[in-house]
């Protein structure tokens, strides 16, 4: 049976992995059962307060258990999420909100104070700290009926570009895109429910949404690695050891630092089986050292080439799997054909571009 939305994956996982840890967040963890309950309860909060369907809802939180169930709750409500970087200057956040016009922003006490003065009129705030989580409730039938209104080409999320060349551009990615990519990855790399994802990518990166798909589809556990650990490779490797991480995506800079410090010869990572890299040049000397180590450790290395169009770097991972048109100001500027591409269009569309 063809799946229509990614919640269909997740509902099966919730039944099969209820008591298993879904997410580790520093000293905290949450099971799949609890993650499902928080996600559905938040979805019901969205439905009761906004009654929106197929609309963008922003998330302004740091990477945490709360941000994971915020994204899932939005999808359960029949809408699509747009994660915002809490380190982004508020004026840029304001530009993004004015451009996309989400119906609401999910945040908490810690971060609401940063943006409350720049939120455009008509966009409501949902503060997680003001929700009574002791009284978790939702209407299963109503949530299911809303999901039945979706089709597979409806959006799952919006990813914003960095804005390095001007106003950030919103890229809409749909459910079918992630179905195709995830199912290819599951078949190609044999992900199972025993895999543990080292999630180092920021919430605003496309790869984070793929990691979320692995959690939903196979019951893989996610270890949320704080962004600031990028500068501390020893600490990262110790965390990978401790949590028995089997899959990680990171930019070459981190591995260059690890190679320069010769850490791979000092620390064993027997559980790490798959590494993905993208986003920048990987110097030959350090790459050779890392690749030699991976051959010894039986670890599979995948490198995704970056693509730049008119000076705009567009989704380093996902862009490589697009088999269709990339639209810019409603004009076709690039068309990619991959003869062996197992995917249909990977839903990449520059969204409401503003000069």
Image: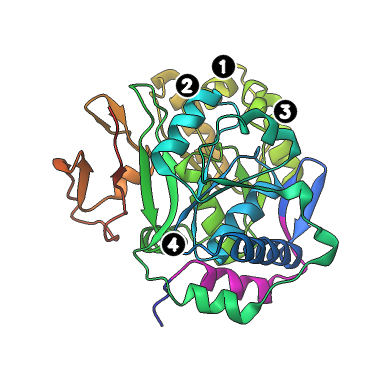
Rendering colour mode:
rainbow
The boundaries of the magenta stretch are 5-22
Q: Is residue 6 magenta?
A: yes
Helix, strand or loop at mark 4: loop
Q: Which residue is mark 1?
A: 260
- Measured as percent of width and height from the top left, residue 308 is found at 27, 30
Find residue 286 and name its label.
Answer: 2
3 or 2: tag closer to the N-terminus: 3
Task: Locate residue 279: give its quadrant.
Answer: top left
- Measured as percent of width and height from the top left, residue 332 is found at 14, 43
1 or 4: tag closer to the N-terminus: 4
**Figure check: 146 above or below 251:** below
The C terminus appears in which quarter of the rendering?
top left
Return the residue nearer the eye: 199 or 92: 92
3 or 1: tag closer to the N-terminus: 3
Local crowd at mark 4 within 10 Å, few (<14), some, or many (≥20)? some
Q: CA distance from mark 4 to mark 2?
A: 45 Å
The reply to whether discs 3 and 2 touch (Cβ–Cβ < 8 Å) is no
The reply to whether discs 2 and 1 touch (Cβ–Cβ < 8 Å) is yes
Return the residue nearer the eye: 162 or 277: 162
């Amino acid at each position: 049976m063809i799946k229509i939305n990614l919640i269909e994956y997740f509902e099966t996982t919730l039944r099969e992995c209820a008591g298993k840890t879904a997410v580790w967040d520093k000293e905290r963890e949450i099971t799949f059962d609890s993650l499902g309950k928080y996600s559905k309860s938040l979805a019901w909060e969205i439905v009761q307060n906004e009654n929106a369907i197929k609309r963008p809802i922003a998330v302004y939180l740091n990477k945490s258990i709360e941000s994971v169930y915020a994204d899932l709750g939005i999808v359960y409500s029949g809408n699509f999420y747009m994660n915002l970087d809490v380190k982004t200057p508020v004026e840029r956040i304001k530009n993004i909100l004015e451009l996309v016009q989400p119906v609401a922003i999910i945040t908490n006490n810690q971060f609401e104070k940063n943006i409350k003065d720049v939120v455009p009129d008509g966009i409501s705030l949902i503060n997680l700290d003001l929700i009574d989580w002791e009284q978790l409730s939702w209407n299963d039938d109503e949530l299911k009926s809303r999901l039945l209104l979706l089709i597979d080409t409806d959006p799952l999320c919006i990813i914003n570009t960095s804005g390095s060349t001007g106003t950030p551009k919103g890229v809409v990615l749909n459910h079918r895109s992630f179905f195709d990519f995830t199912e290819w990855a599951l078949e190609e790399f044999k992900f199972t429910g025993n895999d543990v994802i080292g999630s180092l990518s920021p919430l605003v990166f496309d790869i984070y949404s793929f990691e979320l798909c692995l959690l939903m589809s196979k019951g893989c556990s996610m270890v949320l690695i704080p962004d600031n650990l990028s500068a501390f490779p020893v600490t990262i490797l110790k965390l990978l050891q401790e949590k028995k991480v089997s899959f990680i995506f990171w930019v070459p800079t981190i591995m260059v630092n690890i190679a320069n410090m010769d850490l791979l010869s000092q620390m064993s990572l027997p559980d790490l089986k798959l590494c993905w890299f993208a986003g920048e040049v990987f110097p030959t000397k350090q790459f050779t050292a890392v690749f030699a180590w991976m051959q010894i450790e039986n670890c599979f290395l995948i490198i995704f080439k970056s693509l730049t169009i008119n000076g705009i770097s567009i989704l380093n991972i996902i862009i490589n799997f697009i088999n269709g048109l990339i639209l810019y100001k409603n004009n076709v500027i690039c068309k990619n054909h991959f003869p062996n591409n197992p995917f249909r269009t990977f839903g990449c569309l520059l969204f409401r571009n503003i000069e």
